[in-house]
Amino acid sequence: MSASTALMTDRYELTMLDAALRDGTADRHCVFELFARRLSGGRRFGVVAGTGRLLALLRDFRFGDDELRFLRDEKVVSPETIRHLESYRFRGTVTGYREGELYFPGSPILTIEGSFADAVILETLALSVMNHDAAVATAAARMSIAAGDRPLAEMGSRRAAEHSAVAAARAAYIAGFHATSNLEAGRLWGLPTMGTAAHAWTLLHDTEEDAFRSQVAALGSDTALLVDTYDTRRGVELAVQVAGTGLGGVRIDSGDLPIVAGEVRAQLDELGATETRITVTSDLDEYAIAALAASPVDAYGVGTSVVTGSGYPTAGMVYKLVARQGADGGWVSVAKKAEGKGSQGGRKRAFRRLENGVAVDEYVEIADGFEELPAAADVAGGRALQVTLVDHGETDVSYEGPGGVQAARAHHLAVREELPVRALALSKSDPAIPTVYADAGDR
C-alpha cells in the first residue's frame, strides 16, 4: 500500500490546479491562511494541535504511480496536469502558531506561502489534521483545568476510528492529559501508557476474589483493582483482603460518582488502606470532572468525551487565500466577503499582548502587500506567536516526533498560565480575549 498522503484531498483542489495550469495562473505567488472564524461551542479559547503530524504528512504528499494511475483512470485532471504532479513536492514556506499555543477567532494559525499550484492542494490535508486535533486538544485542556492537580488518562480509542484514536491520544497529552491507554500512540509519540483490567477480567474468573488474586499475582499489589463489577462495597472489601492495605488503587466505573467515591474512600480508610488511590471513569467530561472537585478522587479516566471534542468534534477552521500576485506582478490582498463567512485579507503577523503576565488581546497586524512586518520587539508587551515550520520546502523537524510532542505539551502548559481568570470557566461565553487588527502601514 502506498504511503502517500496526496489523495487525502478533495477533487476540486486538483481541478482548480488543472484549470490554473491551463490559464497561466498556477505560478502566481499566493498566501493561504488557516484560521477559525469563531470558537466552537461558545468556548473561551482554542488549543492548536496537529502541527507536528501535519508536517510529517506533508513530507509524504507525493504523487506516486498508484496515485497518478487513479487520477488518469478516473480522468480527474488532464494529461498535462498528471505530468506536473509527477514531480510535485511542496516547495513553499509555512509559518504558524507553535503546537500547544492558544488561539482565538481570526488567529492566523497557519500561513502557507508558495505558488498557487503548490499551496492550493494542501487545503484538505491541513484542515482534516488541524480541525480534528485542535478540537480534541481544546476539550482536553478544559478537562485538565477542571481536574487541577489530579492526573488524567485518555482511554477513548474504542470510541474513535483507528487512526483518529492515535491522533486524539497525542492531542490530549499535549493539552494536559498524563497518559493514554493506546499503545500505538505510546510507540509513535512516546506517550506514557496505562491500563490494567476491564470487567471482562473479573467475569472470566469463577469469583471476584480469584480475579483479584490473579491480577495482584501478575501486576503486584500496587495495581488498581476494578471494584464495581458486582457490588462495590464487597469489591472494595475483597480488594484490600487480597492485596493488603498497600493496595495501589481501586477504579470505579459506575454509579453516582461523587457519592460512591465518598463511600469508597471512607471504607478504604476504615480498612486501613489510607494510601490507596481512587480512580473514576464512566463517561466523564469537563463538567463531570468539575463536579467531582470536592470528592475524594485521585485520578480520572476519560474516554468518549475527549476523543470527540466533548460534543464539538471539529474546530471549524478554514483555509482561505488572503493575498496573491496580480497579473502585473504586484501584490493584492484578497478576502471573502460573504455574510457570516468573511475573512481578513493580507499577510499577517500575530502577537499576544500581555499586562503583568496576563493576556489582554490577540494583536494581529496586516500588511496589504509583502512589506516587512514588525518584529516582536516592535509591539509593546507583545509575545510573537508565529514560528517558521517549513522554509522553502524544508521542514523544521524539531516540531515532529516524540520530541515535538513534549515541546508542544510544555509550551501549552506555560502559555495557559497567561490566561485571564475568566478564561478558566466552563460556561459558554465570548472569547477570553479580543482579537485586534491593525494596519502594519500605520506604524
Image: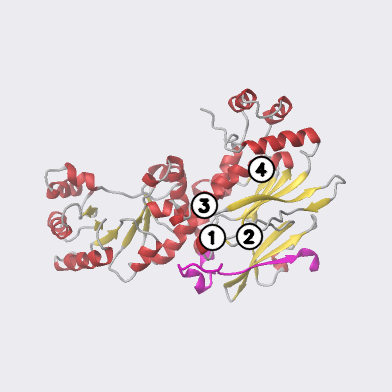
Q: Is residue 440 highlighted in magenta?
A: yes
Residue at horizontal 68%, vertical 31%? 85
Counting other residues with Cα less than 10 Å from the Cα at mark 1, is it few (<14), some (14-19), or many (20 or more)?
many
Residues at marks 2 and 3 touching, judged by CB atoms closer than 8 Å = no
Q: Nearer the viewer, mark 2 or mark 3?
A: 3
- Position of 115 with respect to 263 (left or right) is right
Counting other residues with Cα less than 10 Å from the Cα at mark 4, is it few (<14), some (14-19), or many (20 or more)?
some
Task: Give the extent of the magenta segment.
Answer: 414-443
Q: How is the image coloured?
A: secondary structure
Q: Secondary structure at mark 3?
A: loop
**Residue wearing tag 4:** 394
Residues at marks 2 and 1 touching, judged by CB atoms closer than 8 Å = yes
Where, by quadrant of the figure, is residue 250 drawn? bottom left
Residues at marks 4 and 2 touching, judged by CB atoms closer than 8 Å = no
Give the CA distance from mark 4 to mark 3: 29 Å
Where, by quadrant of the figure, is residue 333 drawn? bottom right
Residue 413, visible in the rendered structure: yes
Q: Amino acid at mark 2?
A: Ser
Q: Percent from the top left, x then y, of residue 188? A: 46, 43
Q: Amino acid at mark 1?
A: Gly
Q: Percent from the top left, x then y, of residue 186? A: 41, 45
- Position of 148 with respect to 367 (left or right) is left
Q: Amino acid at mark 4?
A: Glu
**Residue wearing tag 2:** 107
Q: Nearer the viewer, mark 4 or mark 3?
A: 3
95 over 115 or under it: above or below: below
